[in-house]
Image (cartoon, grey):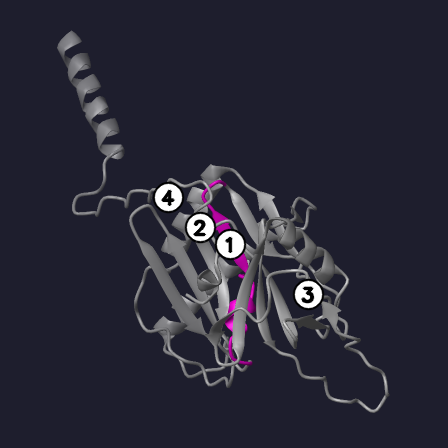
Amino acid sequence: MAVLRAAAVLVLVGALGACGQQPAGAPDPAPSPDLPGDPGALVLQVDRVGGFTQPGADAGRLPLVSVHADGRVFGQGPVAAIYRGFAWPNVQVRQVPVGQVQELVELALDAGVADTADLGSPPVADAPSTRFTVVTAEERFVREAYALSEGMGAGGLSAEQEAARAELQELLDRLLGVAQPGDGSPQVYEPAAVAAVVRPWTAPEDDGSGVDFAGPPQPWPGPALPGEPIGPDVSCVVATGEQAVAVREAAGAATVLTPWSSAGGTWSVTFRPLLPHESTCADLTG
């Protein structure tokens, strides 16, 4: 009887061990990717690029979401929907656990950011592309989808392309929810450096009201404009230290139409707070 009991125990132990094993022929689960060692390094970002806009506009655009290795998540806060919008953008930052950063990177890779299959092009004119970037300790993955949100339901795509786009849209929605959770946790971001994307100033079209919406030129408190060329009739300068503080204060009292005077010229400026992984104008044009 004792021999029978011992045999039964061995059978049970073997069965339990088999339950914890991969089925025969099943692939091993992919290991979790290592994050970059620099706490301020970018690990995950979503941008809108291209579309019907003026040259150099991408340099002044803010990412929709930017996730960094130390758990800081940057996003765009709400802005007033008014004519002559505020010159200073509402960039917000919140802190999430580093473990959640790892989960978000894995989520992005599972959603297909590292895939290379063609995502197609919906029949939508002049829409921007949504660009997803994932950076691990070993690799960098970039994938773009033209008219990702605008093209939903527009047709012109295969079933596989629609499914792949749906996964990327779901990823974007999830990331936007992390950046702006609606619980008041994001804080206003105070950058150490500010880029100014510069163009020659032109007066806005007269709407017949006789009102000068732009106002008189304001003295520029940062490095001399227009700076280094980054595109046709587009230049860029970066303000740091006390100049960055002065530029931010001046922008806070200005609108997107405000002309700025510097070096004998009058200029239009788009203010672009630099994120922790950015330090020069070149970081905005890559």
User: Residue visible at 23% across and 44% down?
Assistant: 28
Q: Earlier in the sequence, mark 2 or mark 3?
A: 2
For residue 220, the mark is 3
Q: Earlier in the sequence, mark 3 or mark 1?
A: 1
The reply to whether residue 174 is in sight is: no
Q: CA distance from mark 3 to mark 1?
A: 29 Å
Q: Which residue is mark 4?
A: 36
Q: CA distance from mark 4 to mark 1?
A: 15 Å
Q: Is residue 125 part of the magenta span, yes or no?
A: no
Percent coordinates x, y for residue 146 in the rendering = 44, 75
226 or 24: nearer the eye? Answer: 226
Q: CA distance from mark 1 to mark 2?
A: 7 Å
Q: Earlier in the sequence, mark 1 or mark 2?
A: 2
Q: CA distance from mark 3 to mark 4?
A: 38 Å
For residue 42, the mark is 2
Choose mark 2 or mark 3, whichever is in front. 3
Q: Are marks 1 and 2 in contact (CB under 8 Å)?
A: yes
Q: CA distance from mark 2 to mark 3?
A: 31 Å
Other residues around mark 3 within 10 Å, as few (<14) / some (14–19) / many (≥20):
many
Q: Residue furthest left?
A: 3
Percent coordinates x, y for residue 76 in the rendering = 62, 58
Q: CA distance from mark 2 to mark 4?
A: 8 Å
Q: Which residue is mark 1?
A: 66
Question: The C terminus appears in which quarter of the rendering?
Answer: bottom left
User: Residue visible at 41% across and 80% down?
Assistant: 121
Other residues around mark 2 within 10 Å, as few (<14) / some (14–19) / many (≥20):
many
Three-letter residue code for mark 3: Trp
For residue 113, the mark is none
Q: Secondary structure at mark 2?
A: strand
Magenta stretch bounds:
54-70
173 sits left or right of 25 in the view: right
Residue 124 higher or lower than 221, as above or below: below
